[in-house]
Image (spheres, rainbow, N blue to C red):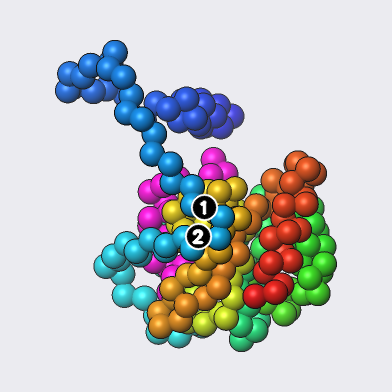
Amino acid sequence: MADSVALSALDWWAEAGVDTLADESPRDWLAAAPAPVSTIPARGETIPVLPTPATSVQLPDTLEALRAFLLADAAIPGPANARIDASGDPASAIAVVVDMPETEDRASGNLLSGEVGALFDRMMGAIKLERGQFYLIPFSPTRPTTGRLGEALLKQLKPFLMRHLELAKPRKLLLLGDAPVQALLGRPAAKARDAEQSVSIGTLTVPTVATIHPRLVAMKREWRPLIWADLQRFEKL
């Protein structure tokens, strides 16, 4: 109980903008903040893919070996017994990336197994896709206790996702939620979803659609038309 209360308090301070406990360097706290620079692309503009951070870990050369690595290696954040594997058909040429497992997924051992998963199945069914017809990949194989993936984890996990995609060789890519969208496209899903874009994966240039995660759509029904428009765009890729 004490741990959960402490984590909640830390989350609240993080949301409030507190990122350090002390600052030894003097600064002018009354100075005007610099004017914000807009990073939202115009409609139809292609979003550049950010470079993949370097990693010193030697990654496997086959998809089977990489999946085993992601489930067991200490280079991956989170306990090995809480990790969830990718699922579906990697030879389908369709890859769908979610940010992390849901709370219910640890008991089932499968991604998107609860109510959010049922909504996800209906979403994909609306564009005539069942789970065995695409490859479902978690950006993070484990779910952090905070339920969020911070900037440090995005940078740490991005090379593993890029290697995963390089070995799977999808011909089109659907990114669900802020973590994979932020890591690959450099902006939140809500800002990236309405732009034409592609991701460079090895020697391939893969057309990509970014959209809102089903768990958020489950909480805000008014977002359903947005994700439906994104799925229709993905179907036509």
**Relative vertical location of residue 66 with respect to residue 117 in this rendering, above or below:** below
Q: Please name the residue shown 17% across and 23% down the image.
A: 25
Instruction: Identify the amino acid type marked 1.
Output: Ala
Task: Residue lying at the far top in this picture: please name it.
Answer: 30
Name the residue beneath numbered marker 1.
Answer: 42
Q: Can residue 226 be seen in this view?
A: yes
Quadrant of the drawing holding the N terminus:
top right
Q: Please name the residue shown 56% across and 55% down the image.
A: 43
Q: Is residue 181 left or right of residue 51?
A: right
Q: Pick whichever, 24 or 32, lies toward us.
A: 32
Residue range (magenta): 139-163
Q: Please name the residue shown 74% across and 66% down the image.
A: 232
Q: Pick whichever, 144 or 212, lies toward us.
A: 212
Q: Please name the residue shown 17% across and 18% down the image.
A: 26
Q: What's the CA distance linking mark 1 and mark 2?
A: 6 Å
Spot occupied by residue 94 in the image (x, y as percentages of width and height): 63, 77
Label drawn at residue 152: none
Q: Name the element at disc 1.
A: loop
Spot occupied by residue 97 in the image (x, y as percentages of width and height): 59, 65
Rendering quarter of residue 222: top right
Name the residue beneath numbered marker 2.
Answer: 45
Total numbered labels placed on residues in the image: 2
Q: Report if the CB atoms under discs 1 and 2 are less than 8 Å apart.
A: yes
Q: Pick whichever, 212 or 139, lies toward us.
A: 212
Spot occupied by residue 51 in the image (x, y as percentages of width and height): 34, 64
Q: Name the element at disc 2.
A: loop
Instruction: Identify the amino acid type marked 2.
Output: Glu
Q: Is residue 74 visible?
A: no
